Image (cartoon, rainbow, N blue to C red):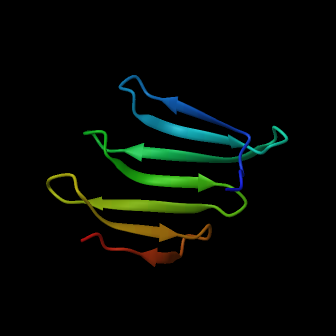
């Protein structure tokens, strides 16, 4: 398996929820960051990946906090892909 990252740093909020991840390449140079947005109950409702290509993933949840439909947007804000969980 090929290794793409030399180091990963994870930052958590005071409740232990992941709020962002920072990735460095094998040479120690920053190669990306992922930011997580959560609702009041701590569910991830949005994920933004900042790498060579930025994307934004917005999750829709049902009343039991199950993920229903992640919408994936390009860096220009256009919808790239829509999935439905079954």
Residue 74 relative to residue 24: left or right: left
Q: Residue at x 49, y 76 (%)?
A: 79
Q: On the image, which quarter does residue 58 sit in?
A: bottom left
- Residue 30 picture quarter: top right
Q: Residue at x 53, y 45 (%)?
A: 35
Image coordinates for residue 2, horizontal then vertical, percent: 71, 56
> Going by the picture, which residue comes out furthest to the front?
1
Residue 78, image x and y in percent? 53, 76
Quadrant in the picture for the N terminus? bottom right
18 w.r.t. 60: above or below: above
The quarter holding residue 60 reads bottom left
Image point (73%, 60%), residue name? 52
Instruction: Please say if 67 is above or below 86.
Output: above
Quarter of the C terminus within the rendering: bottom left
8 w.r.t. 13: above or below: below
The residue sitting at the left extreme is 63
Count of residue discs: 0
Q: Residue at x 47, y 69 (%)?
A: 72
Front residue of 31/46: it is: 31
């Amino acid at each position: 398996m090929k290794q793409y990252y030399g180091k990963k740093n994870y930052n958590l909020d005071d409740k232990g929820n992941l709020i962002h991840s920072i990735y460095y390449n094998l040479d120690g140079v920053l190669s990306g960051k992922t930011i997580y947005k959560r609702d009041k109950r701590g569910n991830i409702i949005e994920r933004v990946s900042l790498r060579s290509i930025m994307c934004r993933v917005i999750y829709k949840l049902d009343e039991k906090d199950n993920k229903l439909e992640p919408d994936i947007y390009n860096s220009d804000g256009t919808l790239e892909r829509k999935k439905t969980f079954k």
